[in-house]
Amino acid sequence: MTYCVGILVREGLVMIADTRTNAGLDNIATFRKLHLFEKPGDRVIAIATAGNLAVSQSVLNLLNEGIKNPETGEIETIYSIPSMFKVAQFIGRAIREVYRIHGKSMEQQAASFDVTMLLGGQVKGGRLRLFMIYSAGNFIEATSDTPYLQIGEHKYGKPILDRAVTSETSLQEALKLGLVSMDSTIRSNLGVGMPVDVVTIRRDAIEIDVSHRIDRNDEYFLDLRERWSAALRAAHQAIPAPPYGKD
């Protein structure tokens, strides 16, 4: 299990991912799930992955090494695709190519071909965009009405984002709310765990703004966790008791 979130606001983009993977209760490991592809001034792209680790790693390798364009015969990589929309299409092609090579044999072994990706970033000349790409290679895009997308174990962090995030939320507030949603997920699901990787990208900067790994001893995250817990306790205590039954 995993939890990854992307939040697209007027000032820029926040992407956050945990690092826990498991194949049973006694086989837990740490793998980076938030991957960066950057050529400052030309493109800045972040990809978060959820699902089968072998599938996601194969897809990421194809993005780096390239896939032959059936129309031109040229090898295309994530660094040569001219727009974010076409990058989303390119990742879809890579997923389908991995399925062509491994999908049937995985199904014969009762292994699920399961991969979902968040794609966020900006290519020079285009706009900052955020997509969610499914295992079939199709995708959806974040909009001003729905400025965030989640993959993995999303239900614990979703109520926080639903209540607080809009397209006009500041980049720093979006980061803070994303971290609160991550903390809520970590507290409620053992399949999601530290460290947590964070990336922010400012609109039209075409370079990474923040790239940071939060570990168990991160002072800000520990303070955020305690403040959020205290705020929740204070909020429910301030609400009048239900007027049903006897005191």
Image (cartoon, rainbow, N blue to C red):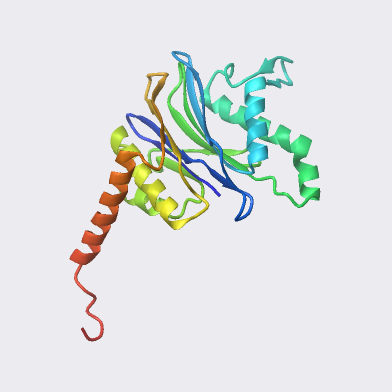
Q: Quadrant of residue 136?
A: top right
Q: Quadrant of residue 96?
A: top right
Depicted 198 relative to depicted 36: above or below: below
Quadrant (top left, top right, bottom left, bottom right) of the C terminus? bottom left
What residue appears at the point 43 percent right and 26 percent down from the top-left corner?
A: 128
What residue appears at the point 43 percent right and 24 percent down from the top-left corner?
A: 127
Q: Nearer the viewer, residue 221 or 168?
A: 221
Q: Quadrant of residue 75?
A: top right
What residue appears at the point 53 percent right and 21 percent down from the top-left corner?
A: 83
Q: Is residue 169 visible?
A: no
What residue appears at the point 57 percent right and 25 percent down from the top-left corner?
A: 86
Residue 148 screen position, x and y as percent: 42, 41
Q: Residue furthest bottom?
A: 246
Describe residue 90's horizontal placement relative to residue 101 as left or right.
left
Residue 195 screen position, x and y as percent: 45, 40
Describe residue 46's horizontal placement relative to residue 177 as left or right.
right
Residue 2 screen position, x and y as percent: 53, 46
Depicted 157 relative to depicted 54: above or below: below
Q: Nearer the viewer, residue 112 or 133?
A: 112
Q: Nearer the viewer, residue 63 or 1?
A: 1
Callout count: 0
Q: Is residue 108 visible?
A: yes
